[in-house]
Image (cartoon, grey):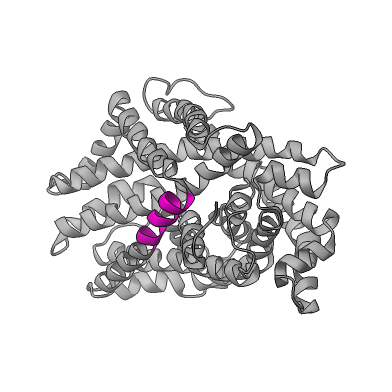
Amino acid sequence: MGFATRMGAVAATVGGAVGLGNIWRFPYEAGQNGGGAFILVYLICILLLGIPVMLSEFIIGRSTHKNMMGALKQLSPKSKVYGFSFMCVAGAIVTLGFYSVVCGWVIEYLLQAIQGNLSGHTPEQYTELFSSFVGNPWQCTLWTVVFLAVNFLVMSRGVQHGIERVSNVMTPLLFVLLVVFCINSLMLPGSWKGVEFLISPDFSKLTWKGVLDAMGQAFMSLTLGIGCLVTYSSYFKDETSLTRDATIIASLDTLVAVLAGIVIFPAVFSFGMQPEAGPKLVFEILPSIFQQMTGGYVWAILFFVLLFFASLTSTIILSEGPIAFISEEFHMSRNRAIAWVAGFTVTVAVLSALSFNVLSDFTLWDMNLFDLFNYAASNIFMLMGGLFTAVYVGWFLDKRIIADQMSNGNHLNKVVLNYTVLCLRFVAPIAVGLIFLYYVGLI
């Protein structure tokens, strides 16, 4: 079992990396932190942190062709490091659970757009529309479960006929839709103000907080730290160039984030709106803009189709890690493993959906369940998982395995090898430590 083609492997991994965070978080962070200055720092973080940590997961997975636990058992048979796999699986399920709630919102708004219900409202009414939807426990929960059903239906088709086939269609279409939206946004009057907001370098606005945000965005955008890339890379062919594919995947992921900014901010500035991050941007501000555009009905539909593609491809990668873990380690059929993962995920997802309505008064550490799961996934599971893989590969894995995987058994430039090991041993652990301290409020 594995990806049938290299293109399919790249499409699946790029699709897994590209998610809603690329569309609503990265552009806003860039605009608020010096535009081009933030993007420059982000690119440096990708080179020093993102690609090396991605390579560490690729090396673990492709060298063994097993899930995270099976790989660690094979690579370090005399130690108990494989126990860390449980944290990776938990992180993937928690991330998939809360993230699916937002994906359910996308389905609702796609249907509303098709029915023509996203036009003729004031900005305040768009806010009321969104609040009314998430405040309805049945409606919010229904679309969350529907989205997960679609996700696990794809997973039931297997790696080649499910993951690869869907990714081969949706990932290219996602890029096509982004380019079409970019052209439309750049043709709007006053659009250049939005482009300047996004890309004009202003280092006076780039604070240390902005630098840490760039580091965190680079890390989390690539879905690092929860073993999903270990599982995906276990399906890579032995002749696949890990270094080349990691570079391509990171580059395309960054390109999507920049293109999303070019889609959003020219339109926001053209219609006199205020740029904001998070659900408010996607579900309140942009619908208000679409209704003012020529052909706004079509643009609204296409935008939420784009979001649906990004949502599905990014949840597929989150699902595959736990499914492969349960299937391989507990010797279950794939469908039975899917049923177990679906059960755990739906539980987390339903609790997350209900945290906006019937469970809104239930909080832990001053967070509702949705925010708690989001915080745990982004600031604990992913960061600790990324720290583990970087340290494990950089300090403990036989350097000959690293060289063999990065070169496919051929000669490897020592500069490239030493650069990767240096980043994994020193740069990544220090960076992850700083990000963790920042997100928990200690710096």
Name the residue at the right extreme: 78
Name the residue at 73% across, 39% down.
84
Residue 442 can be seen, yes or no: no
Q: Decide if residue 281 is on the left or right side of residue 216.
A: left
Name the residue at 13% across, 62% down.
295
Q: Compared to 220, does 441 lie above or below?
A: above
Q: Compared to 326, does 63 lie above or below?
A: below
Provide residue 182's location: percent of width, then percent of height. 31, 70
Give the overall secondary structure of the magenta segment.
Answer: helix
Is 273 within the magenta?
no
Provide residue 92's location: percent of width, then percent of height. 56, 40
Provide residue 309's location: percent of width, then percent of height. 35, 53
The quarter of the displayed image where residue 89 is located = top right
The quarter of the displayed image where residue 212 is located = bottom right
Q: Decide if residue 278 is on the left or right side of residue 218.
A: left
Q: Decide if residue 269 is on the left or right side of residue 400.
A: left
Q: What is the span of residues highlighted in magenta in the rendered image?
A: 159-171
